[in-house]
Structures are given as C-alpha cells and as structure tokens.
C-alpha cells in the first residue's frame, strides 16, 4: 500500500446518546482522514468525544441509547455505517484491531490467552488449530512476552498489567489489520511499562505498516509516536495538524492553553503553571456558539453566538476559531 | 541524614510497614528515614506497589507501623493517645486521589466540610460554622452557595477543591497529598496544583506530595524521594534529581516519560527497562532493583546498598552511584 493512500475517511460524523437527563451530543460534525502507515493522535479531555469517535468507527456504540445521526465513515472504500452487524464481525479484529485502556476487562478471564488469539485466527483466517497455535505463539513472541509457549496456556489473571496489554496487542494484531485503534492503551500502566508498550507499538507500526489511531490525553505520548494530531473539545474537532504544527504553532486557544498548562521536565521549576480556567460545558446543552468561549481568554461577542468555521493555515493545518476566520 | 534537624516538622526514622498476606509478608514500606522541614514540599514518586501511598498513610498513623518512629514537632505520634493524638491528627491532614470516592455522595458540601469542625469541637454556633465554611469555599475557589449542593453536582476538579477545603478546615500544618491530581483532566490539573501552591505560601503549609507524574512532582516539590519496592532509592533537591539522577532506576524512570515536544522526543535516548516490577512479597535479594537494572553485578545480588550521600543533600542507594 502506498504511503499516500487514504485508509479511513470520516466525514461530518454526528453521534448522540439518549440519557435520563436528555440527549447528549457526544460527537458533533467530526471530519478527518487517515493515510496508510500513519499514526494519528486524537487528543482531548474526558467527555470530548474522542473515545466515542473511535468506537463508532468500530461500530461498538450500543444503539440505543446511542444514535448515529449523520455522516459517513469510509474504510478502504466501504461505508462502515451501512454495514450489517454480520458484515462488521468480518471487519472487526480482521481489518480493524482495537486496544482498550483496561486489558483486564477486555480479555476474557475464563479463556486462556492462547485460545483468545487462536479464536480470532480460526474465525478470520480459516486456519486450523495447529496453524493457529503456531501463529499465536509467534504473535506472543513478537510482542515481547518471554516464554511464549508457556504463556499460551495461561489465563489473564496470571499476567501482570503490562503483559496483559502486550497480550491484547497480540490479539489485535494477529490478523495483520490495516488499522489499529488504541484507546488510552497505556493509561493504566506504570511509566516504565508504558515505555515498553510504546516502543512495541512503534516497532510494529514500522515493521507491519499498520495505520494507528491513538486516543490519549498525554501530549508526551503524542510527541513520542504520532505523525498527525486532532484536538477535540466538546465533541468537535477544534484543531488538526501535523505533530510539529500542533506543538510549535498551535492556533486554537484550547490547544495553546493545554500546552501551556503542562509542567515540563525540561523547564525550571519556578515558572508558574498557566491553567485553563473553568470547566468543559455540559454536553446535554452544548453552547450555541464556540464551546470553548466560556474558558477562552480571547473570547469575543460573536464566539458565544455562533461557532466559527474551519480556517486553513497550511495544507495540513486547520483550526476552528473566530480569531482566524474573522480576519 | 542529619537527625538533629531542628526545623524539621516531620522526622521519619526507620519506618516499616509490613502486611501479612496469604503466602508471606508484604514489605510495603521497608526502612524509610526522611525529614520534612516546616514549609517544605517533599515529593514521593514511584510506580504502583512501591509503597508510596502506604508510607503516606503510615506517617499519618492511619496504619499502625511495624517498626520505626515518626516525630511530629519532636513528639512520637505512635506513642500518643487520647486528646494528644486527637490534637496531632488535627494538625496532619490528607487529600485523596479519587475525588469521587472520598466525598460522601449523600452529604451536602456543608456537612462534608463541617465534619472536621464537629469532630474537633471547633464548631461554635451554626451561623459561625456556616461563615467559616463559606470562607473555606472561597479560599479554594468555589462559591459560598456551593455549600448547599451535593458532590454529584460538581466536576472532578471542583470535587478535589472540596476535598482540599475539608482538609484545611481544621487549620493543619502538614498535609499528605496522595495523587491529588491523577484523576483530573490535564487542563484542570494545573488549577489544583496552583491552588495547593498558593495555600502553602499563604499558610506556611508543609506537604508530602505523592504522585507518579514526575513532571508535576518536579514542579511542586522542593525535594523528591524516589521509591522502589518499599525502599527509598534516591532523595535530592528536585532540580538536582532531574538534572543529575544517580540511581539507575531514577534514570530509567525519567527517561521513560514522554516530553510534550517532538524535537526533544526525536533526539531522546530512552532507557527501556526489561521485565516487570517484582512482587513485593518476595523481593529480590540485595538491591531490589537488580533484576531490571542494566548495570547490575554480583555484588548487587548479595549486598543491600545503603542510602548514602553522593553529593551534598543528594542521597542514592546504589553501590555504583
């Protein structure tokens, strides 16, 4: 696959949830592309819609209470949103793999690790038991588990957190998926283990050419292993750009605020942190205008009334802010 | 470490906390000695299971120690009882990690903050107490009318402010902050850290700040202690620790943290440790870190390295530091 080929194209995606308190508009008009072999980060705080976006791509949103109200998700020329559940089963695990934050809840505790990999292989790759076992042991070795033959027969509770996450990566990658979605894959892990898992993912991406969507709130991880970044706030994409553009030349006040509020190991400690004041809006009643206006130091009158259009700063860099579109 | 530190508010000496578990003894805190000066912030970092939270709780006597002493203003808190212990408890407070689990969901904010007043008989009239509560809410950046609301009406950051107001209610001098920002969104963490720093400046508070976010610990702490498997492996002024780490574990820990700057990340040589953290129930012989240490030798397996001063005020427990 050539480097420039678009693997995934999400357009004007709208997802909402019916809750007891009312309709929560979790994802609002989200549009982005992903190229072959690219690592894309989706950054945002809790409730910004980043995980819902990823789960919608996998069609893992329970409907109801969830509702996909609009948009298209084009994965290698097929519209994911038009697929039946049966057709999705053929895509999930085979063409799109997913790693979740908590490996304990996504691995089945009553089935051996090996069986959880061979099951996927036998379903999607028509392998027989022997072939599947061979491949599963190879996968466990690939993700750096010592003694893969012995590990194959063990249950998830016999694994440490880092080992479980490796096993989950082995499950997700066993069918050579085109796309790997990783939802906060290292948040539950200690930093020295996180470093191991990130190295592993980078290595596999380079070796197998997998495209990655990495959902994270840790901008350090973004700087470490992603090529492009999408910043989400209150269900919308507020800025998009290459890693260099986002870190060196952030355009949206939320992105700037986020970068400024981080303490950094390479800075003297007496520089005060500059927090973003206030809290994110209630998505049951999202503001009429820009959702960040309440917390924005540059907010103008129009920001509260109407949301800004997308302004393009370079072929790869765009943001949604009146400061740029008003000019 | 100098034991005659006269301005030390907290003097921890040989503190041990063991737990009996099914198949052995878990040495959660194994011989910790540390002084915390008045007005100082000592950060404690380490990975899960290193004993940092147990240390914080044992120092407040929320756990009874297995061995060792903690002097608060020169007096051993483990020997105190009755009214003396109660007075000491008033001076030593805690802020918890989970702002959802640490506030009673059925109590209004007023009742939550009023509880320490009542416990320590500082209440006075109802009107007086309400006034004090409103003042506390104001000090932590909330509004007086928030007193009548319930925890579920607040965001994580606001809940953490309520927890801070509760800790401040009895006018303590020492606060153990156990991962106070780990559960908060990035944009909210800086708000809470700035609040803790402001309060420290205004009231001369002394903090023990437990966290795994090394960048935030560096930012808030005067000195930082690094723990591994129940042992303190390094202690230094925070700038010195980050600029010139001595223990191989500290070096690996610092290099593991991704810096939010693509240029630095591209140039960085990361030390990726092999393997997992060993179980604290059967820790390795000799140096606890030797099973993952890239520089371990035979001596490390047989001899426990002592914590020694490698340069002024900079301590490390490594034979080769």
Image (tube, coloured by chain):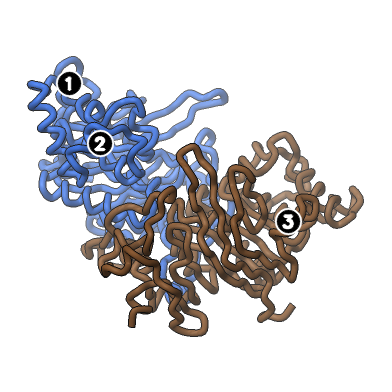
Chain colours: A brown, B blue
- Label 1 is found on which chain of the structure? B
Residue A327 position (above or below residue B278): below
Q: Earlier in the sequence, mark 1 or mark 2?
A: 2
In the shown orientation, is residue B88 left or right of residue A163?
Answer: left
Residue underneath mark 3: A141
Please name whichever residue, A262 or B76, is drawn nearer the observer in this view of the structure. Answer: A262
Q: Residue at x 51, y 60 (%)?
A: A28
Local secondary structure at mark 1 = helix
Instruction: Give the quarter of the figure containing the C terminus of chain B.
Output: bottom left
Residue underneath mark 1: B118
In the shown orientation, is residue A187 left or right of residue A67?
Answer: left
Tell me the CA gap for discs 3 and 1: 60 Å
Tell me residue A107's x, y (percent). Answer: 67, 43
Please name whichever residue, B104 or A166, is drawn nearer the observer in this view of the structure. Answer: B104
Local secondary structure at mark 3 = helix
Residue underneath mark 2: B12
Farthest top residue in view? B82
Tell me residue A225's x, y (percent). Answer: 54, 68
């Amino acid at each position: 696959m050539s480097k420039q080929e678009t693997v995934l194209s999400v357009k004007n995606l709208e997802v909402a949830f019916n809750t007891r308190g009312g309709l929560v508009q979790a994802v609002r008009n989200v549009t982005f592309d992903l190229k072959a072999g690219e690592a894309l980060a989706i950054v945002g705080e809790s409730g910004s819609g980043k995980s819902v976006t990823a789960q919608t791509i996998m069609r893992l949103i329970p409907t109801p209470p969830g509702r996909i109200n609009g948009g298209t998700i084009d994965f290698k020329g097929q519209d994911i949103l038009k697929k039946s559940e049966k057709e999705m089963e053929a895509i999930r695990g085979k063409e799109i793999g997913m790693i979740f934050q908590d490996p304990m809840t996504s691995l089945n505790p009553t089935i051996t690790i090996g069986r959880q990999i061979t099951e996927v292989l036998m379903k999607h790759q028509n392998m027989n038991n022997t072939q599947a076992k061979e491949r599963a042991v190879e996968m466990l070795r690939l993700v750096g588990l010592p003694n893969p033959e012995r590990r194959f027969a063990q249950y998830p509770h016999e694994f440490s957190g880092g080992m479980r996450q490796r096993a989950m990566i082995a499950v997700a990658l066993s069918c050579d998926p085109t796309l790997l979605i990783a939802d906060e894959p290292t948040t539950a892990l200690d930093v020295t283990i996180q470093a191991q898992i990130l190295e592993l993912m980078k290595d596999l991406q380079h070796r197998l050419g997998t495209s990655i969507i990495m959902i994270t709130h840790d901008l350090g991880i973004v700087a470490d292993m992603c090529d492009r970044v999408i910043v989400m706030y209150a269900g919308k994409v507020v800025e998009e750009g290459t890693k260099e553009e986002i870190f060196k030349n952030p355009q949206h006040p939320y992105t700037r605020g986020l970068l400024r509020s981080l303490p950094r190991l390479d800075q003297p400690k007496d520089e005060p942190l500059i927090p973003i004041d206030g809290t994110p809006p209630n998505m049951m009643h999202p503001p009429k205008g820009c959702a960040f206006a309440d917390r924005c130091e540059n907010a103008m009158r129009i920001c509260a009334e109407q949301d800004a259009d997308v302004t393009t700063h370079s072929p790869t860099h765009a943001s949604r802010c009146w400061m740029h579109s008003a000019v | 470490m100098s034991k005659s530190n006269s301005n030390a508010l907290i003097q921890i000496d040989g503190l041990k906390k063991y737990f009996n578990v099914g198949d052995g003894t878990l040495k959660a805190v194994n011989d910790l000695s540390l002084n915390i000066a008045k007005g100082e912030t000592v950060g404690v970092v380490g990975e899960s299971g290193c004993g940092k939270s147990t240390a914080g709780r044992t120092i407040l006597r929320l756990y009874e120690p297995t061995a060792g002493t903690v002097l608060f203003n020169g007096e051993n808190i483990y020997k105190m009882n009755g009214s003396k212990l109660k007075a000491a408890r008033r001076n030593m407070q805690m802020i918890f990690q989970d702002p959802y689990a640490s506030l009673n969901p059925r109590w209004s904010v007023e009742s939550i903050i009023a509880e320490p007043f009542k416990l320590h008989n500082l209440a006075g009239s109802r009107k007086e107490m309400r006034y004090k509560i409103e003042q506390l809410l104001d000090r932590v950046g909330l509004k007086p009318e928030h007193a009548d609301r319930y925890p579920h009406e607040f965001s994580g950051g606001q809940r953490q402010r309520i927890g801070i107001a509760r800790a401040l209610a009895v006018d303590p001098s020492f606060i153990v902050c156990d991962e106070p920002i780990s559960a908060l969104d990035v944009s909210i963490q800086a708000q809470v850290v700035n609040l803790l720093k402001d309060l420290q400046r205004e009231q001369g508070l002394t903090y023990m700040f437990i966290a795994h976010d090394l960048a935030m610990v560096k930012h808030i702490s005067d000195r930082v202690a690094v723990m591994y498997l129940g042992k303190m492996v390094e202690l230094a002024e925070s700038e010195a620790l980050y600029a010139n780490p001595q223990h191989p574990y500290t070096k690996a820990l610092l290099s593991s943290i991704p810096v939010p700057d693509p240029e630095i990340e591209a140039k960085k040589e990361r030390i990726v440790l092999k393997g997992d953290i060993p179980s604290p129930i059967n820790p390795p012989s000799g140096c606890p870190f030797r099973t993952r240490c890239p520089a371990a030798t035979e001596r490390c397996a047989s001899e426990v390295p002592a914590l020694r001063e490698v340069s002024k005020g900079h301590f490390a427990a490594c034979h080769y530091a």
